Amino acid sequence: MRLAAALCVLGLAACASPPPGLEFFASPAPACYDRSAQPQTAVVDSHLHFRPFGGPAVPFDEVMGYLRETGVRFVNIYGIGQMLPVDSPCTYYLDCPGTPAVPTLKNDFANAANLVTSPPEGVHATLAMTFPDLARPETVLPAIALLDREFPGMFRWMGEVNLVKQALFGNGHEPVPLTAIAEWAPFMAVLRERGIPIAIHSDLGSDEEPTRYLPLMREVLDRYPDNRIVWMHMGLSLELKTLPAAEHIRLLSSMLDRHPNLMLDITWRIIDDNYFSKAENQPLYLDFLNEYSDRILPGTDFLASSNKDFDVYRTELAVTSRILRFVDDEAFRNIALGENYFRLLGLEYEAPPVCGRRPS
């Protein structure tokens, strides 16, 4: 493959055919998508944090420009539910160990206000509620009611919310107690009634104890089988980098088989860095993604802090989409071209059929 074509496939250069516009996905009989000439990166970013943990954010309109430039036509607007204190000098929690990162509504208000004042051209945006403190479920419904009053009908997603996130342990976060999950029932009922998915960050475990926290996610899925639940990062994290691929895939497959409303997101480059990109792992994960292609969502997990720019976003999109250039055409349509995302949210868009030869 020539260099220009290779860069196109990776999402790092213009392709022979430009990325299709939003209207391409609104047609009742969309034209086909040529994988041999058009970008192999996802048109959906289901996991993009428009607000940082601390400090200033990349301007809202600038981030929307990143999406248009890279061919991303659909996005979930995440805030960050856990913010550092306003007087903290840090933009990232790991730079401030010992400083609490506390759940708050601030970022959700900022995102909604930005969307009202600057509706993006050429990008379909879905607002996400990122404020919930799952260990204090009694606080969730009052906050939803507040958002309903201030921004009626605008929030159609919940997450990313933390069930257990080991990386935040140094900033005051603890795993949600197993007993607290039963108390989610009132707000989970509201999500079901409104058809709102909930996207949960729940680490499987660590290299020392790979499935230590698995009972938490199992409890959620067993207790709320009718809710649409997205498991962030396939349960992986920086603390779990050595889980054998075959073991990981067996675990995920069994959970998907048991819970028909469960979906996975493959966002965050640590999945590609530590799992997908390894030669011995890739065939196993490709088989998995092809088999469960209707249960997978793509995205970058980009954090729009002021020290990030377009080049960072473009690279994150390329890395998190890299595995998708090898999946079969059905999986590419379901995942990269957005069919799963449209179906999950009930959007009136349709992923096009795939034509042309898949790049090798």
Image (spheres, rainbow, N blue to C red):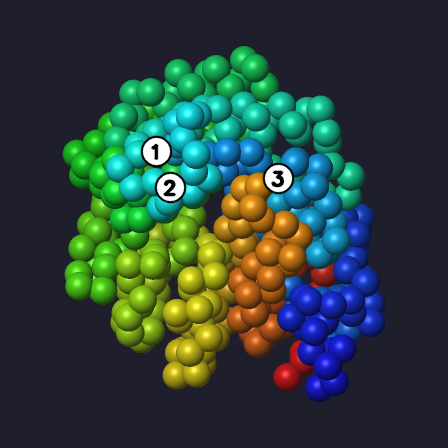
Return the residue at label 2: 93
- Is residue 344 shown above or below 289? above
* Total count of labels: 3
Return the residue at label 3: 58
Secondary structure at badge 2 equals: helix
Secondary structure at badge 1 equals: loop
Q: Quadrant of residue 71?
A: bottom right
Q: Quadrant of residue 137?
A: top left
- Is residue 237 shown above or below 127? below
Instruction: Identify the mark nearer the N-term, 1 or 3.
Output: 3
Dot 3 surroundings within 10 Å: few (below 14), some, or many (20 or more)? some
Numbered mark located on residue 101 in the image: 1
Cα separation between marks 2 and 3: 17 Å
* Residue 51 x %, y %: 53, 36
Q: Residue at x 58, y 48 (%)?
A: 308
Instruction: Identify the mark nearer the N-term, 2 or 3.
Output: 3
Dot 1 surroundings within 10 Å: few (below 14), some, or many (20 or more)? many
Please state which of residues 265 and 174 is positioned toward the viewer in this rendering.
Answer: 174
- Is residue 67 shown above or below 196? below
* Residue 151 x %, y %: 59, 19
Cα separation between marks 1 and 3: 20 Å
Please state which of residues 118 and 292 is positioned toward the viewer in this rendering.
Answer: 118
Asked if marks 1 and 2 touch (Cβ < 8 Å), the reply is yes
Q: Is residue 310 left or right of residue 98?
A: right
Q: Amino acid at mark 1?
A: Ala
Q: Residue at x 18, y 55 (%)?
A: 212
